[in-house]
Amino acid sequence: MLHDQDLNRKCPCGSSKPFSFCCEPAIEGYKSASTAEALMRSRYTAFAMGMVDYLINTTASSHRNPDDAEILAEQVLATTWTGLEIISTQAGQTDDEEGVVEFIASFEAADEAAQLHETSNFRREQGQWVYVDGEVEIRPQSTP
Ligand SMILES: [Zn+2]
């Protein structure tokens, strides 16, 4: 049962839109992400909310591994995601077949704040955007 508070809850991806109008339709499967950036945001939100099935379903079929569910479930438990900033996007629009999204996601794990800086590659499979792979750099969060 949804309450007003839930409907108006801001989406974890930092878009400042309510969750129900942002990443929820993609995660719940009502409406797939229309751009690579939208898919990336919804995957961040799925990480933040621990929706492992969605993360697997939006990984390119060639990049899935049998132990993904187990690894992701462990990651989700060990990590608290605290913010997302999109740095840049290339292609990945509604009429593209491939796209690149560069972003910084902040997280806390084992009581340490850190940032994941990733340039991710996305492509369409059967019309749906999926995550292929990325170049990842993890660095400690600079303390102000
Ligand atoms: Zn969102």
Image (cartoon, rainbow, N blue to C red):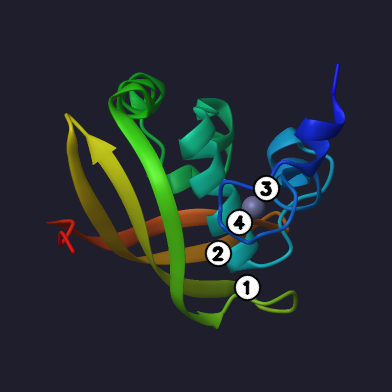
Camera-side mark, 1 or 4:
4
User: Marks 1 and 2: CB-CB under 8 Å?
Assistant: yes
Which residue position holds label 2? 123
Residue 65 drawn at (x, y percent): 36, 32
Kind of residue indicated by mark 1: Glu
Camera-side mark, 3 or 4:
3
In the depicted structure, whether residue 133 falls above or below residue 26: below
Q: Quadrant of residue 78?
A: top left
**Distance of mark 1 from mark 2, alpha carbons?**
6 Å
Question: Would you call the spot at circle 4 few (<14 residues within 10 Å), some (14-19), or many (20 or more)?
Answer: many
Task: Determine which of the numbered discs, if any, sits on residue 97 in the image.
Answer: 1
Q: Which residue does the image show at 44% across and 66% down from the upper left?
A: 85
Which residue position holds label 3? 10
Q: Which of marks 2 and 4 precedes in the sequence?
A: 4
**Distance of mark 4 from mark 2, alpha carbons?**
10 Å
Image position of 101 (left or right of 75) = right
**Distance of mark 3 from mark 4, alpha carbons?**
17 Å
User: Marks 2 and 3: CB-CB under 8 Å?
Assistant: no
Q: Which of marks 3 and 1 precedes in the sequence?
A: 3
Q: Which of marks 3 and 2 precedes in the sequence?
A: 3
Closest to the observer: 94 or 83? 83
Residue 1 drawn at (x, y percent): 86, 16
**Distance of mark 2 from mark 3, alpha carbons?**
28 Å
Residue 48 drawn at (x, y percent): 48, 37
Which residue position holds label 4? 39
**Distance of mark 1 from mark 3, alpha carbons?**
30 Å
Camera-side mark, 2 or 3:
3
